[in-house]
Amino acid sequence: MGELCKNLHVTTKRNRLPVDGVYVAQYEEYRQSLIDHLYKVKLGHWDISIRELVSKALYNLADRDPEVMAKQVLPTILPLTVGWDLNTRHGSILCAAELTHALYCYGAENNRSLLDILGSSCVEELENIIPKLTEAKLFRGQGGELMRPAVCHFIEKMSLSKFECFNVETVVTWRNTIDDNLNHLQRSIQEKAVGALRHFTTHFYQTKDGRAVPDIQESLITVYIEKLKHPSQTMREGFTLAFGALPKFMLDGYLLKVIDSLLQVTEIPEKDAGKFAQSRADALHSLANIAETVGVQREGVGNCVINESTMARLYQCCFKAMKDYTIDSRGDVGSWSRKAAMTCLLKLTLVVTKTDTELLSKETCSQMMCCLLKQCSEKIDHTRAHAGEIMLKLIHKQNPAIPNIPEHKILCDVFPREDCENLNWGAAAEVFRKISKLLEIRCYQYAVLSGIILSAGGLSECLIRQAGVSLENFLGRLSATRQDEALMNFAENLVKLFREFQKNDRVIIPLFKVLDHLFSIGSLNFLANEGGESISEALFDLTQNEIARIPDARKIIVSINVFSGLLQFPGKTRRRSLQRLLILLCHKYPRVRKATADSLYTALITYDDIASDESVEEVLDILSETLWEETVDQIRPQRNILCDLLGVPKPVLKNTAKGKAKPETSAAQDPLSSYKDLVSRVDY
């Protein structure tokens, strides 16, 4: 038997120690040996997971021999909770917490109080553990990072055990301990403190009639709201999470104040947007938890439940958070907010449907599905998977079903119930094959298109290929069936996307790449038909506006192929595009000049009606033989010859202040034209 006890911990399954311990303890002759082995040998084990398993095993064994646990085991380990050996101290606190809770459960079943089972001396020692640790400064340093989650777990278990403190100051100390850990740098410690807070407030801050102690409630809410405005990101994160853990009675009368404060946290600041990205996501999680805690009533009192007006504000907050694309040195930190917003949408919608499905308007459901489908077609795998899972849960929910989802049946046909288990959202080919079918649904086309554009114009080769193929196939089907109206609607959505995200390189650069691809394969040839000129002109105007007076060579180079693609459309669009390309041939950056010459050369070969038959050979020779890396003054004559051959007026820079023409600035006089500047900004 002793050998069995020694080997219980080496199993590959973490839960075997508590389970096997209960099995062995049913035999009375082995029970005492097992208990002794756990608290005398394994309590201070070097592996933290073993210490945690020992505490769980003792919890499970407590009802087998409660007297031994109360009179022998607990009194033995209590002095060790403030000892100097870190591992033993940590294990002892965990075991003391679990044993106290187990003995409370035993007493509740047998109509005995915890004080009666433990005795006053044990209760007093339990009460003094945290004050002694604080006095000995054992929450500091590396060891403190181990003790902090342990004491949070201890407070949680004491609260669940309805522990009555002899000293009122102990409750204050425990509350201060929770607040201190809410402000800790480690996320795991913050989460432990949040877990303890809910049970702590339920036990210590609730009166017999189920209400909060008035003064304490006001003080806690006021202090926590002030913490949400603190410049420290860890403090904001911890106390934001804390609001999501508060029980309903603690929010009664202050609900609107709390929600207003959390909504303010979700706002993206103009400066240091990345600094508080995690707190924005935490605020969304807390808002969802609050909605689940207090419930929804259409005409309810705003300070007690989520009513119709508050619900609308929460939905709008989620929709706004889905547009958070903040990027800092850690990457796309805005994705934390987007994922949190999706989770909040799901929880809020499920709460609403349990109460009153009519609260979900057509507009709200339409906007919710558009936001989710956009994320389903974007480039980050884990974000796409999260959005897809939530979307599938919503469209396939039954009893009651989510109302007012536009084209609900088509969505269910494209994403059948089996996809909830089988669809791999990380497999781009499978996902985009399905998601591209929704481009045919007018109400979803813009949302899906805006996501596919980001994927097709991104950096991942797999996503570029699969998203690009999905667009090609969609446009090919429309062209084959001559759905001219649908094609024009698609083009209008491209222009709409362009206008919505002007000067936003996160969207515009991928859009440039996608436009270049669609032009090159002829998918946008329909713009040459009647009614397409206004769209092609709009694309030119928007592209020109994007690169006007910018020093970003990469963005200019990507736009060059868009101008070249627009040359295929005769009339004003071609004339203006050709003029813009000829201006770029004398750009201050050699790299831009070379890219323009190459792109224009390709366009002249592809579209044979741009230049006359008499001049095309000479134009091609000039483009291919001129050394465009030379100075602007040296290549300007060649550029001007091209202007004459193509019938385009020679570009002249004008002095806008005096209205007089002035010579173009020499590249040598412009500090931004140097190769050093180019290398520093574009890695060329």
Image (spheres, grey):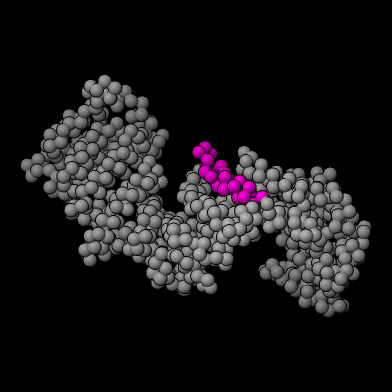
From the viewer's perspective, is 537 left or right of 19? left
Which image quadrant is residue 480 in?
Answer: bottom left
- Residue 236 location, x and y as percent? 63, 45
Q: Quick check: 581 above or below 314? A: above
Q: Is residue 398 left or right of residue 213?
A: left
Quadrant of the rendering where the C terminus is positioned: top left
In front here: 446 or 337?
A: 446
Identify the residue shown where x is 22% and y is 41%.
577
Left or right: residue 428 versus residue 115 is left
Q: Residue at x 86, y 55 (%)?
A: 165
Q: Which quarter of the rendered picture does the N terminus lie within?
A: bottom right
Magenta-colored stretch includes residue 408: no
Observer-nearest of 92 and 238: 238
Please give left or right for residue 272 compared with residue 599 in the image: right
Q: Quadrant of residue 47?
A: bottom right
Say which residue appears at 40% left-offset and 43% top-offset. Answer: 504
Identify whether 609 is placed above or below 669.
below
Residue 5 at x, y percent in the picture: 79, 71
Question: What residue occupies the far left of the structure in this picture?
Answer: 614
Question: Looking at the picture, how far across and down is residue 103, in whole percent?
Answer: 84, 67
| Magenta segment | 254-280
Q: Is residue 100 above or below residue 605?
A: below
